[in-house]
Amino acid sequence: MVGRNFAIVNRMTQTIETPQTPSHDEYAIVATFSEQSLDKLALIQDQLSERLGDVIWLTPRAALHSTLMEIICDRDYGRTPRKQIFTDWHNTYSLAMSETLAEIKPFELDFTQLEVSQRAIIARLADSRAFNDIRAKILSNIDLPEGTKLPPDITHCSLARFSKPVDLESVLHKTEDVQVHFTQKITGFSLLKDLGPPTFDPKLIQSYSLSGTLIPIKSR
């Protein structure tokens, strides 16, 4: 069903507050959005804000993305600093990642659903096979750092998170008429550092193009 919320909730289920904890040396490979898609996402966010007010906080425009996979996530990696773990991984697998993604042809993502859960409100695809096939191909050629969680099996963009606990059924009711329907063409992926709070100002580490030509590395 196009553009409708879906969730299974129990009576008295509460949303879970997500504090804006600062990002620290977190790295992910993501698809970013065109200005046209960002405008459509912003319109959806405006509708959410009108209906929910200060119950939610919105992902800023500069940080809207769809995660292919995390490389260094928000976890304890032990004594070795996250930045060092990432540098070692990048030195080992940068070329393999580029070559793997260069074998993939550009494709389109059709965002058609709004999903409300206890932790977030997201725009998502009904069918995630495109991303999942790429994830499987990557993981057949590289290893993620020990401690990094495996990629999700959905394709989505996080639009908002909750700033306070409220009744989830009420949120579902208030957002039931919010529609999601847009298409984003994917011609490459970006390796970004620190997509989250407090600045929501991700740093580009490397760009990967699909179907042939490699984009030069941009390191920071």
Image (spheres, rainbow, N blue to C red):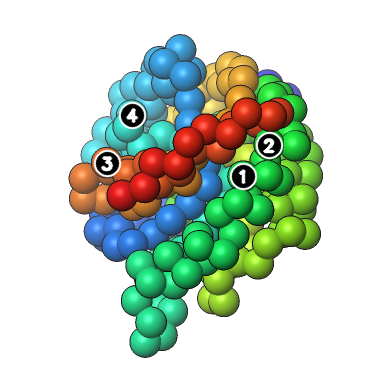
> Where does label 2 land, which residue?
102
Q: Which corner quadrant of the image does residue 143 belong to?
A: bottom right
Task: Determine if residue 51 is in view.
Answer: no
Q: Secondary structure at mark 1?
A: helix
Q: CA distance from mark 3 to mark 2?
A: 27 Å
Q: Which residue is mark 1?
A: 98
- The answer to whether residue 65 is seen in the rendering is yes
* Within-10-Å neighbours for mark 2: few <14, some 14–19, many 20+: many
Q: Residue at x 42, y 21 (%)?
A: 38
Q: Position of residue 109 (x, y in %)?
A: 66, 26
Query: Which badge, 3 or 1, is on the more N-terminal residue?
Result: 1
24 and 143: which one is in front?
Answer: 143
Location of residue 161 with respect to 34 vertically, above or below: below
Label 4: element kind: helix
What is the CA distance from the residue labelled 1 to the residue labelled 4? 27 Å
Viewer-nearest of labels 1 and 4? 1
Identified by mark 2, the residue type is Ala
Tell me which amino acid carries mark 1: Ser
Does dot 2 land on a helix, a strand or a loop?
Answer: helix
Residue at mark 2 to residue at mark 4: CA–CA distance: 27 Å
Q: Is residue 146 left or right of residue 100?
A: left
What is the x, y in percent for residue 176?
54, 27
- How many angstroms separate mark 3 from mark 1 (CA)? 24 Å
Secondary structure of residue under mark 3: loop
> What amino acid is at disc 3?
Asp
Q: Which mark is residue 61?
A: 4
- Front residue of 122/162: it is 122
Name the N-terminal-most of marks 3 and 2.
Answer: 2
Residue 51 quadrant: top left
